[in-house]
Amino acid sequence: MIDHKKIEQAVMLFLEGIGEDVCREGLKETPERIARMCGELYGGMEEDAAVHLSKTFSVDSSEMVIEKDITFYSTCEHHILPFYGKVHIAYIPDGKVVGLSKLARAVEVFARRLQLQEQLTGQIADALMESMQPKGALVMIEAEHMCMTMRGIKKPGSRTVTLAKRGVFETDSALEERFFRMMRAER
Ligand code: ZN
């Protein structure tokens, strides 16, 4: 549950902590503004991806489905700075597929909370497996981390790539190769 009062108090303390004058014009409404924004950035904690992923429809085919370049924005839990990029999802249906917009909705649920990229990747893959019971799922995330680009080693444009494989993708390496071929083919 997001507690606006606590966030406002914390932001006031934080601003004082970095030596700011919390009464100056530009900062007057900042604590309240941040508290409101937190609902949008971290509201995913109160949501369940299964709500979106359980709206499936039946198919005969068990051909690989790929939804690529799903844009996401999340927040790194180590620095509370944004990381953002693209999620690519592949799955092998077992009689059921899900509307393509629902995959993007499921990504949002996990992205809108404090995260680690590796964990985000795994959570999306697990949610797919649980809600849709496909034969297998593969999730790949390419992201830029502001904690790497605006501070620390400052390497703008560097991207972190993570991969999570479940079901048949874990045992059949030909499927993974096909995923990468299909990804390249359209680029
Ligand atoms: Zn970080």
Image (spheres, grey):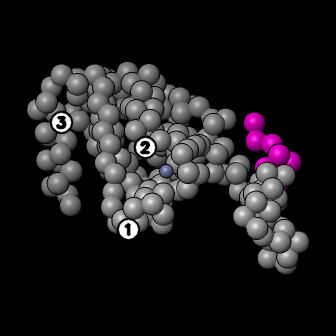
What's the mark number on residue 176? 3
Q: Main secondary structure of the magenta part?
A: helix
Give 166 or 113, whichever is nearer the viewer.
113
* Amino acid on which the number 2 mark rests in the picture: Gln
The yes-or-no answer for disc 1 within 8 Å of ligand 1 is no
Q: Nearer the viewer, mark 3 or mark 2?
A: 2
Q: Is residue 4 above or below residue 156?
A: above
How far separated are the C-alphas under marks 3 and 1?
29 Å
- Whether residue 69 is in magenta: the answer is no
Which residue is rendered at x = 45% and y = 28% of the image?
Answer: 127
Q: Nearer the viewer, mark 2 or mark 1?
A: 1
Q: Which x, y percent locates residue 181? A: 13, 47
In the picture provided, is 31 more to the left or to the right than 133?
right
The part of the chain drawn in magenta is: 1-8
Q: Quadrant of the N terminus?
A: top right
Q: Gap between marks 2 and 1, in whole Å? A: 17 Å
Which residue position holds label 2?
117
